[in-house]
Image (cartoon, grey):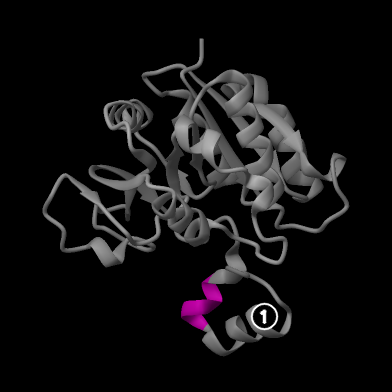
Amino acid sequence: MAKVIVITPVKNSIVTTLDTARAIASSTVPVKHVIFNDFSSEETKTELEKNKTVIGYELIHIEELTNNPSPNYKLVLQMAQKMGLTENLPVLVVESDVVVKPTTVAEILKYQESHSKAGLVGSVTVDENGFVNFPYLKFKGVKESVITTQRSLSFCCTMFSLPFLKSFNFTELDEAKDWFDTFISKKAIEMGFENYVLMSSPVWHRPHASRPWKQLKYTNPLKYYFLKFWKGLDKI
């Protein structure tokens, strides 16, 4: 019996996606892992289908549900919330450029269950050498094992508690945005919940591996901001 619903939105990047799925499958607590394929290439779609029974995840193709072009994070979050409420389980987002440890899900779940006011509980992200990296560089100097924060949590590896899922309807998310990390983090605080980052439970993050064009932010910032503002991509 699953204790957590884990969701992973996917847009190509099949190698990192399968790394993510294998890591989740090795969790020490039973999970229901659902991959949302958001208009990936046919090659990616084929590989996801081929591996779903081998690794052990459910697969939903967004293209069968909407004609809206990727990213469809709002729809993914709404569907995940419905699953969580139906099955009375918290929802953990693990993005397709993140690799969790076997104990990660159990550690997040344990902390969330022991803190009644928890809204969001996330794991800090690190690079392959274990150093805190994007998007949690703002917490790089933190020495505590757990921090309560008013700042936004990234959804790289973040759990929505069941009480929070019951309190805020994701149909209220802004249609004009692509990503909702900042909005949902603030909404949880606004509603009286507390958000935590587990510094003692790091996950390996390969920034933007799932959306390579975003690497332009570091290699060609002029082109990145052209795509962001002129093309309307990456709306936060």
Above or below for 78 versus 1: below
Horizontal arrangement in the rendering, residue 41 relative to residue 196 (left or right) = right
Of the pair 194 and 178, the residue shown nearer to us: 194
Of the pair 121 and 47, the residue shown nearer to us: 121
Can the viewer see residue 95 in this picture? Answer: yes
Which quadrant would residue 36 be assigned to in this image? top right
| Magenta-drawn segment | 215-219
Q: Which residue is mark 1?
A: 227
- Residue at the (46%, 78%) spot, across then down: 218
Horizontal arrangement in the rendering, residue 127 relative to residue 78 (left or right) = left
Disc 1 crowd, CA 10 A, few/some/many (<14, 14-19, 20+) = some
- Residue at the (65%, 86%) spot, across then down: 226
Residue reaching furthest to the bottom: 222
The percent position of residue 229, horizontal first and vertical second, equals: 66, 83
Please tell me whether residue 216 belongs to the stretch shown in magenta. Answer: yes
Above or below for 193 versus 180: above
The percent position of residue 136, horizontal first and vertical second, equals: 33, 60
- Residue at the (36%, 19%) spot, across then down: 28
Residue reaching furthest to the left: 143
Horizontal arrangement in the rendering, residue 101 relative to residue 167 (left or right) = left
Name the secondary structure under disc 1. helix
Please tell me whether residue 133 belongs to the stretch shown in magenta. Answer: no
